[in-house]
Amino acid sequence: ATITDAEGDTYCQSNMATKEEDAEVAQKSPKRQRINGPTLGEQLEIVQVLKNSLETKSLTALGRHKKTGDKAIILLSKHPFDEKEIGKELSLKSEKTFENSRFAKYLVQSLSRVTCEVISPATEKDIRKYSPQEQYLIRETSEIYCNVTKPIIDAIPESDLEWVYNIFDGKKEQENVLLQKKGGDGYVCLVDYKWQDTSQKKGLHLLGIPIERKTLRSIRDLRGEHLNMLKKMREDILLEIEKRFSIPSSQVLAYFHYYPTFWHLHIHFEHVSGPAGGRVIGRAVPLDDVIENLTADGNYYTKATITCMVSSVKHADIIKKAKETNAVQI
């Protein structure tokens, strides 16, 4: 995986631990290696800004490769402040922008780093996903799922999940894998790319992904027979988080998304005090609740009505088909 900062320096992540680093930090933080090459500005041009979030201090743009003409999605996000560098931040050149009684504001040229993620060549699906869009809540009954949602999921090409299979097969992102269990109830647990600075505990974001191809797309596919797998994943991953990052299970929120970002079952593990972007009503379904529901009724998710959030662009196919069948009114 490559990361490029605001200064144009590009890095790759290597093993989670090295002898030269402090043992505790080495166990928890990826090491970066510089990659020599042209800057992103020399490779890409901006075509259109798609989103500029004041809340998350992030920006998404549609770009184009200058040489090939390929479209690209460019995602810029600022790193959290480094507490050890606060003194240096205050020593930088600043401009007073506001003053009233005891209150003042200054514009400071910050040392904070920026991560740039590039998706290229970007497909039309990628562009729709990251474009501005309206959000709607729908009540998905089992009938709507079977007649509207499932046929669309079944039509998703396997190539869309190639990156997941690359992790399973040991081809990609192995430097981020923390746990791997093989066999019938096998799974992989790895650091999610959104957790940019693993020294920041409250930024904790891991993914637990069952090594089961095609049949487990979402919580809708879970049955009582999967309880042992879910309980084992919860137990193993929470224990690993406490051992590796010194975060107790009482401070970890484990949940699914429905609808998920990608249609292969996966569990998010985040710090309860971390960013709450994905933990909203209509998206997050707690792992504990799923286990309890399946314990009471092994076929719960074949019958349940689920409140879920859909996006006008990202889920356009589902919304269109739901309208045609009078399943929803939007």
Image (cartoon, rainbow, N blue to C red):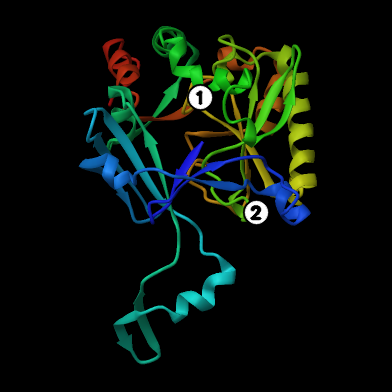
Q: Is residue 286 left or right of residue 126?
A: right
- The numbered mark at residue 201 is 2
* The residue positioned farthest toward the left in the image shown: 47
Residue plotted at (70% across, 16% down): 297
Name the residue carrying label 1: 306
Residue 70 x %, y %:
25, 27
Residue 264 x %, y %:
54, 19
Residue plotted at (80% across, 45% down): 243
The mark nearer the N terminus, 1 or 2, is 2
| Residue type (three-letter) at the residue carrying disc 1 | Ile
Q: Nearer the viewer, residue 24 or 228?
A: 24
Residue plotted at (37% across, 48% down): 76
User: Of the residues tagged 1 and 2, which is closer to the observer?
Assistant: 2
Q: Nearer the viewer, residue 30 or 247?
A: 30
User: Quick one: SS at disc 1?
Assistant: strand
Q: State the image quarter where residue 268 is shown.
A: top right
| Residue type (three-letter) at the residue carrying disc 2 | Lys
Residue 282's place in the image compared with 56, above or below, is: above
Between marks 1 and 2, how big is the CA–CA gap?
32 Å
Q: State the image quarter where residue 296 is shown.
A: top right
